[in-house]
Image (tube, rainbow, N blue to C red):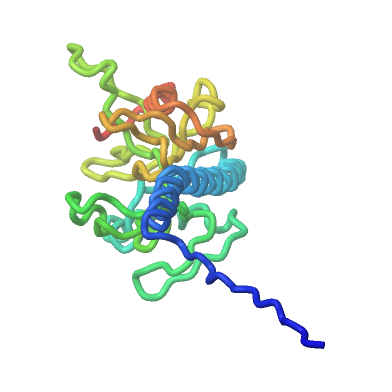
């Protein structure tokens, strides 16, 4: 008996057509364009939170310093390289707070390679147009040269809310102003905590520049800013509130001349 084997013709697998491939690539590009800003924003928000955690620890350090130094704030320069301020016989906020911070700080020559809580994770440096400022070159992380990404509000700030009045009032906003302790001799002196009207509303430290997403909008105005306050707490506050906290005047606490 003759058997007939049925033959089945196999069809080759169909691949993507050029149109389908282009369509898939286009969809992937659209999804990437939508998701990338989201991922970037999440990453930057994480850095802002990490920065705020650093500031909380620095706020504790400032409180401990004040408790150990007759209730006075650190007599330290606003920000900049230690070598720069050493030429003026002044110290930086890193040198003042280092004993109160449980964080590793490591230097190699004149540069820092590790600063712990003194380094903001978003610190990408100052704009290139700034050049060299207080021993810190622009375009590179500030902490690598200053040892700290944060500015200590030790010097007086221009109070534009009162600027132009006649006669202009002395803006007693500084936490460590330079004062004349003798004829022609200037010295930076830490302000007493008792000179602050409300410790919870007086700003002490903040990022040296606008590094976090949301710190500033295209028109240049400030929206949010991480800030350390005189009572030791830290929070991300609206720009206007932060400016007011920074320029908040202190009570007159000495009779020496004050350098503007």
**Does residue 65 show up?**
no
Pick the residue in front: 113 or 178: 113
74, above or below 98, in the image? above
Q: Position of residue 220 (x, y in %)?
A: 27, 31
Q: Residue at x 35, y 41 (%)?
A: 210
Determine which quarter of the picture holds residue 177: top left
Which residue, as the protein is rendered here, is positioned at the far top? Answer: 166
Counting labels gives 0
Residue at the (34%, 44%) spot, across then down: 209
Q: Visible in this render: residue 242?
A: yes
Front in this rendered view, residue 182 or 132: 132
Q: What percent of the width, then of the height, locates residue 165?
A: 20, 12
| In this view, 58 is above or below 228 | below
Image position of 57 (left or right of 210): right
| Quadrant, the N terminus | bottom right
Quadrant containing the C terminus is top left
Q: In the image, residue 49 lies at what x, y percent?
A: 55, 44
Q: Position of residue 98 (x, y in %)?
A: 53, 57
Task: Establish if 101 lies above or below 42.
Answer: below
Q: Point out the residue furthest to the bottom here.
A: 1
Q: Nearer the viewer, residue 213 or 132?
A: 213
């Amino acid at each position: 008996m003759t058997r007939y084997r049925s033959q089945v013709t196999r069809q080759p697998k169909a691949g993507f057509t050029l149109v389908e491939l282009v369509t898939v690539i286009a969809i992937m590009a659209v999804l990437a364009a939508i998701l990338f800003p989201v991922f970037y924003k999440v990453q930057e928000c994480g850095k802002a939170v990490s920065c705020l955690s650093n500031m909380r620890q620095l706020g504790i350090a400032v409180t401990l310093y004040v408790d150990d130094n007759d209730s006075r704030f650190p007599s330290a320069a606003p920000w900049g390289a230690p070598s720069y301020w050493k030429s003026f016989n002044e110290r930086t906020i890193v040198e003042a707070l280092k004993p109160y911070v449980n964080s590793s700080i490591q230097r190699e020559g004149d540069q820092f390679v590790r600063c712990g809580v003194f380094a903001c994770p978003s610190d990408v440096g100052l704009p290139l147009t700034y050049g060299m400022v207080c021993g810190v070159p622009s375009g590179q992380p500030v902490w690598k040269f200053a040892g700290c990404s944060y500015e200590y509000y030790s010097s007086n700030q221009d109070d534009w809310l009162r600027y132009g009045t006649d006669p202009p009032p002395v803006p007693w906003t500084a936490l460590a102003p330079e004062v004349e302790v003798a004829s022609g001799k200037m010295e930076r002196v830490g302000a007493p905590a008792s000179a602050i009207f409300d410790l919870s509303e007086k700003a002490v430290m903040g990022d040296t520049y606008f590094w976090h997403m949301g710190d500033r909008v295209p028109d240049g105005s400030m929206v949010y800013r991480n800030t350390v306050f005189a009572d030791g707490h830290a929070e991300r506050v609206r720009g206007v509130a932060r400016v007011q906290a920074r320029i908040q005047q202190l009570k007159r606490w000495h009779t020496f001349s004050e350098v503007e």
